[in-house]
Image (cartoon, coloured by chain):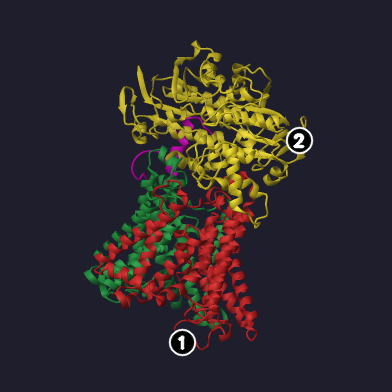
Chain colours: A green, B red, C yellow
Amino acid sequence: MVDFHEFFVAILRSGTPLVYAAMAGVIVQRSGIWHLGLEGIMIIGACATIVGIVLTHSFTIAILAATLTCVAASALQWFVIEKLRANQIIVGLGITGIGIGGTAFAVEIIFGSLAAVSAPFGVPRIGGDFGPYSRLSILVLAMPFVVLAIWVLLSRTRFGLRLAAAGEHPFAARSVGANPSVMRLLAFAAGGILCALAGAELAAGSLQIFAQNMVAGRGFMGFAAVIFGGGHPVGSALAAAFFSLVGVAGIRMQIHFGAFVSHDLLLCLPYLATVLGVWLTSRTRRGTRAAAQIAELQDH
Amino acid sequence: MTGKLDAILRPLAFILLATLICGLVFQIAGYSALLMFDSILDGAFLSRRSLEKSLRWALPLFITAVGVGISFRCGFFNIGAQGQFYIGAICAAFAAEWMAGAPAAIAVPLGMLAGMAGGALWALWPGILRLRSGADEVITTLMGNFIAGLILVYVTSGPLKDPSGSGQQASTRIVPEEMRISDAGGVSPTIIAIAAAVGISGWLLVNRTAFGALAGLAGRNPTMLRFQGGRIWQLGLASFLISGALAGLAGSVELFGPSGRIASGSLPAHGFTAILVALVASYAVLATAVSALFFGGLFSAALFLPILAGLPASAIDLFNATVALLITARIALGSRLHRLPGRWRNG
Amino acid sequence: MTFGEITALADISIDFPAGGIHAVVGQNGAGKTTLARTIAGIVRPDTGSLHIHGQDIETGNVQSARRAGIELVHQSFALPPSFTVAEALEFGRGGGIGFFSRKELARRAGELLDTLEMDIDPDSRIRDLPIELQQAVEIARALSSNARILILDEPTAVLPPPEIESLFQRIRKLGDSGVTVLLILHKTREIEAVADSITVLRNGRFVAGPLPCEEIEADRVAEMIMGTETEKPDPGSGQSDGMTRPAHDGDPGQVKPMPSGPASAYGSALELSGVRTDDTAAGICLDDVTLSVKCGEIVGIAGVEGNGQATLMRVLAGLAGVSEGRMDVCGTPAGELTLAQRRSLGLRIIPFDRNSEGLSLTSMLWENWVAGELVGKPLFSLINPPDIRQRCTASMSIWGVNYSSVGQHAGSLSGGNCQKLILARELDDAARTVIAAQPTRGLDIGATSFVWSTLRTARHNGCGILLISSDLDELFEISDRILVMRSGRIVCQFGPPFDVVQTGRAMMGAAA
């Protein structure tokens, strides 16, 4: 039983950053853009949180700084895609590169070495008497509520409907007086906040450490969760949870069964599932496709 | 003619802009940007030795980038060069393993073929999913990259594990000495010949075959080609296969050449840089060579930048990413007609 | 009382009285849609002003137009296809985050649909609705915010005939309830059926209106729309015989070289019998279309745009499926053939939109010119671009294309030269059957007459030509026969001498 709780805690711990990243991807995807910059913006959030804690010894200031930098990076991505009309996929990859390179650069400038930076404390813990759960951060606790809030925002408010209209049929959004470009900026800003939380949880949730390239593909996995979850907040959160379950189970199996099951091949499951999901949706409907150029999203 | 001039000036302008932005950032961060650019030039291009080192990175990049350029030219966003590179290297490694003891003159070409076949295979399934069902190739090839990365981890820690490995990084067994096509320096007549062959056949393919001309039209305006009765299925599949095969070839060159083995997680930015190389070159083969040399030089500079300028190696990553951010921007630069390939719409 | 005045397009001013149903009519490109979008604030005019009930409204601002009570129903509806009906009715409401519960949403949608007497399930998705219900939802959306002025942009263009009457009933009811309705229409019969007044636009200019409907005759309206009294000076020298070409651009007198293939004078170039399509998503379906084009003949297809011509083109090009009927190209059954195979039989296409379907504007001239030839070759066959460029250069000078280098982008050519480039590609020696869709749209007089004489020469050389056009002058000028297409059907046939009023009436569906 204890083992089960430990297992569940491990899933929550590794899954929470994925869920936050996926939520960022969901919101931006609603507005019509594929968020391939999740990885980069997430690592910026992770770096800013740890550096903030180390420099100011205040979690509040650190998380604010992380949010600000992530929103700024998201706004940059929006600007290049929307205003400079660059290809959204290449720009997403570019933002990822800027995040990974930029954080390594910043750490080296600030601390003078490439070594991992560790912070004296991290995100506040749940605390209390909940066994292994009390060691989890409050961001884990907040995660289901955030998912719920985003679901409400997207499916139960006019704002959400207009956001979806901006992504699906920009002319429709414009003819009811909502500017699709502004809607996308708002989506990117919200995505920036969520990426900051994802990065904060990843770096300061349990480890309290920032290392070079520490996101290690989790941003792209968050993006895969968005696709696999069909762009729906709850579906994508469940997809992210499934992905982290696979990851944790892989490690457990490695420990228990050793060489019998290859844990690396097991880790392929999320990606294979995503490919399968894309294939199935493209067979049933017109297919999931990104607009290469913002011109396709700016009406006729 | 203006089109050609534009295709040259445009990437140069963006590289200049990226240089300015990064220089500003470095200056603000307290480094001397001038010293940095000076040492990059020195260390990457201005001496025979440094040029050779740049070439070592530029050659595989060039081979992959020619393929990326062909698929982008055709309007398919195959961003899976990284995975195709890995799978190519893995297949070549398996082939080398099986043919241990065979004369190198047979084993190496066959190994290279196996690498090309592996890379092509890794581009084939996203291609079929894309052309048959309309599944977006961006997602499938991106996922393919991660799957290939994990397969590489599996192979290097399982079937092809090097028992003498230091434990730090799992890798395949070293290719037997007689099968190597270059030393660790990576610039040998064989590799140069392979790159030249790729360049020449790539150039011929783009400029002297029906495929090349039709691919250009398809990438710019698929609707028009459809009204001409173009066989889009054939065209697309060919472009996927060719780009995959070339990335696979680059992987096997790396295996038989400078590396001698393939370690898990090695050269993680190869595919991304190759995409940049192709974009900067506007998919023209000759320009790809120049652009590959440039980015290869930057990569090589990154290795000694900390020593020369006291600057972190990540500065180069930052510069590359800035170029990526800007290179596809469609700001009017003289000609308003310059366009990226459009994406295929609805199947 | 005056409620609106607008100065837009080519400096036009219109006063619509409050209340009633006002029709705005005109040909394609007359500026009706622009007018509608300008009033709704989607298009910002360069100069001019908009007054609603005497109040000045900021132009180019959807929000302020909607606050003033203006709502626009677009021709191709502006509803996201994945939305449910209830969501589609909700997303346009103004203000704030706008939280709602599912129940409340369903209740609001139900109430609105009930008051409008629309029987639509609020939970069904827009993309699953038939087109007339989509339109109904769009109208309901427009009325959800207490619209005082409702603009409908060609609401009948997409509807099957039985639905049109119920739309009109709905519009009349709205008119009775005090909403001012602006209707953009094409067909005189429909105008008579529903409108109180009529306003005519032509080529972005104001012609007349609003004129009370009962005071004006249908023929007079058709004349005003077509502009028969004035317009297009006849560019050809009357009934030219196809051998001489009117002077044009800078190279007068050059005789057009045309393939002089064996003119099997009475052979069949194109034969359609009983062709139907059933894919509604692709636009108006063809309904029992039977037509034949003989070699050495130009057959015109007249019709207001959007009556199935685009579908006909896609069917001929093999890009849309046929559910019933038979199609022969050059005497060979072509129903199952790919476009490449049809092309090898001699089918050539001059498509509707030369900028997207005809040419790749960002590719070079010679690439565009040679595309058709390359498509027929094996994929990896070697080509010789210098040779192609040379042949292209020769062809360009024969066809009198005004260009500087065959390496320049097609997009840098003028419209007329673009069309010549397409003609140079399509009217090669092997062309037997030519489909020419709106071949002179947007061209100046010189280029227009060039295209016409080229088509005449092609006819002379034995090509069978199907000319799809909504320009009656063009059809009358060069066709041997004219078929009129309306709502996906061929409704009647005319032989020379052609009569504008008669043809116009058939196009607009007025009682003969």
Kindly identify which residue carries mark 1. B166
Residue at position x 58%, y 32% from top? C438
Nearer the observer, A202 or C401: C401
Verify whether residue C117 appears in magenta: yes
Nearer the observer, B143 or C78: B143
Q: Is residue C317 left or right of residue C19?
A: right
Q: Is residue C244 left or right of residue C333?
A: left
Residue A164: give x, y in percent of width and height: 44, 47
Question: Is residue C382 shown to the viewer in this render?
Answer: yes
Kindly identify which residue carries mark 2. C262
User: Which residue type does callout 2 highlight?
Assistant: Pro
- Span colored in magenta: C91-119
Determine the image quadrant of residue C479.
top right
Q: Is residue A231 above or below residue B181?
A: above
Residue C11: give x, y in percent of width and height: 38, 24
Q: SS of the residue at dot 1?
A: loop
Q: Residue furthest top?
A: C215
Nearer the observer, A117 or C102: A117
Residue at position x 61%, y 59% from top? B238
Q: Is residue B339 above or below residue C71?
A: below
User: Which residue type does callout 1 highlight?
Assistant: Ser
Q: Is residue B335 above or below residue C264?
A: below
> Around disc 1, counting alpha carbons within 10 Å, would you say few (fewer than 14), some (14 to 19), or many (20 or more)?
few
